Amino acid sequence: MKVLVVGTGGRDHAIAWKFTQSPRVSRVYVAHGNAGIAETADCVNLKTIEEMADFAQKERIDLTFVGPEKPLSAGIADLFASRGLPIIGPDKKASRLESSKCDAKVIMRELGIPAPEFENFTEPGKARDYIRSVGYPVVVKADGLAAGKGSLVCESVQEAEDAVRSIMEEQIFGDAGARVDIEKRLYGRELSFFCFTDGYTIIPMVAAQDYKRARDNDEGKNTGGMGSYSPHPWLDDALVKTIMSKVAEPLIRGVREKYDILYRGILYLGLMLVESGTEVIPYVLEVNIRLGDPEAQVILPRLRTDLVDISEAITTGRLDRIKPEWDPDYRLCLIGASGPTKGKKGWYKGYPDRYKIGVPIDGVDRIDKKCLVFHSGTEKNASGQLVTTGGRVLCIVSSGSTLKQARETALSEMAKVRFEGIYYRKDIGLE
Ligand code: GLY
């Protein structure tokens, strides 16, 4: 069987790697990949979703799996379906759950799913009036897609007003900030919860802890994610049941019955677990329509079941036949990112702000083969040297029967990787 993976980052590398583990797969293509992915699969330089559909048709691709949200929001699933090409990823209508934070919140409210109190605004003045009136700390979110950086967590009224100015008036996220969702800031424990679904059957995956802030101790700006680990210490069977009955099931059923959306593929719930008496309430902070990055890097290595079998069950609406099995051992993912460096015209602050690219990378070949290495932003330059092309550059995924063991391995292996300005958090998995 031939598989096409759409994506270029660490998550997409992990997806491609997982397909190479299947005895049913003879060839994995990735559109368009990076230098690390090119060592796992065949990278193909396809830019538009039409080029991808043409390629899938010409090469007789049996299954396409979409990593990132952008092609899904652009309608890749609808296009492939119209040509009879099996694909994993929700359609364009479903993708509004991720591509519009404002619409997603309204859907949660209409379906009675726990979510923070919120209001949506298209006028900065009204957004500011609201912030001054509510009297509690807020999170200001750009409505559209902003590469995981569009949520500004505010400590004060002034910070929230500044966030409105940056997003709506200075347009730091471009058109994505034409509308904002302003929601009550919740305090609790964050959890990334993933499910496979064919639109009727919903199967929870194991959960992961993501670390969104750039710096240790959850300081610094929001990023796409600086590390992750799984299993999640808080997730037991009772909590899975609560999340399924209060969030995942009403959401998938609700969008099907009320909005005529058959949601097929991956459901990613960004939750805040808030203790209320003896109960834990899973509040939905965000809905994403894909696997997380860097959560996929720790979840997929724990999946013992063939991803082809699961994918086929999704596309044929027979997910009820699947019972995924998981490795109980820990996986920990540590991201090596482009940190502060000096450029010709001054300093680059480093990811998630501006960073230098084309920086030579050494030491990847010295990483212990027991670890997995997934690349996010790398390429080979004209002389064949591995160089940086992104803010998140590569990650190391270690394993261990304890979180401590996995953490120590990832840190000692990452110390072997050298590039100017390399930065990684030292507290991933430090519980
Ligand atoms: N790790 C956050 C995301 O994938 O959106």
Image: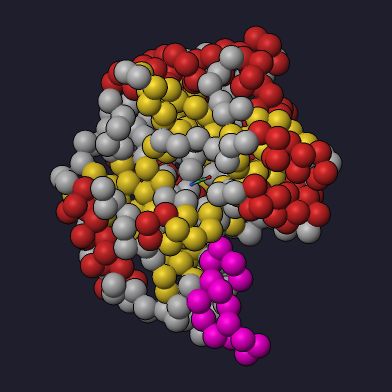
Quarter of the figure with residue 279: top left
Percent position of residue 16, x then y:
45, 48
Quarter of the figure with residue 100: top right
Residue sitting at 70 percent across and 35 percent down?
Answer: 133
Percent position of residue 319, x then y:
45, 18
Q: Indicate left or right for 175 with 114 as reference.
A: right
Residue sitting at 56 percent across and 63 percent down?
Answer: 352
| Most foreground residue, 141 or 184 | 184
Whether residue 349 is visible here, answered yes or no, is yes
| Most foreground residue, 69 or 146 | 146
Q: In the image, is residue 268 above or below residue 301?
A: above
Q: Indicate left or right for 334 with 408 as reference.
A: right
Percent position of residue 99, x then y:
68, 38
Q: In the image, is residue 160 above or below residue 105?
A: below
Quarter of the figure with residue 349: bottom right
Q: In the image, is residue 208 above or below residue 367?
A: above
The magenta stretch spans residue 352: yes
Q: Indicate left or right for 421 with 254 as reference.
A: left
What are the residue bounds of the magenta stretch? 340-354
* Residue that extends furthest to the bottom in the rendered view of this protein: 344
Whether residue 309 is visible here, answered yes or no, is no
The magenta stretch spans residue 392: no
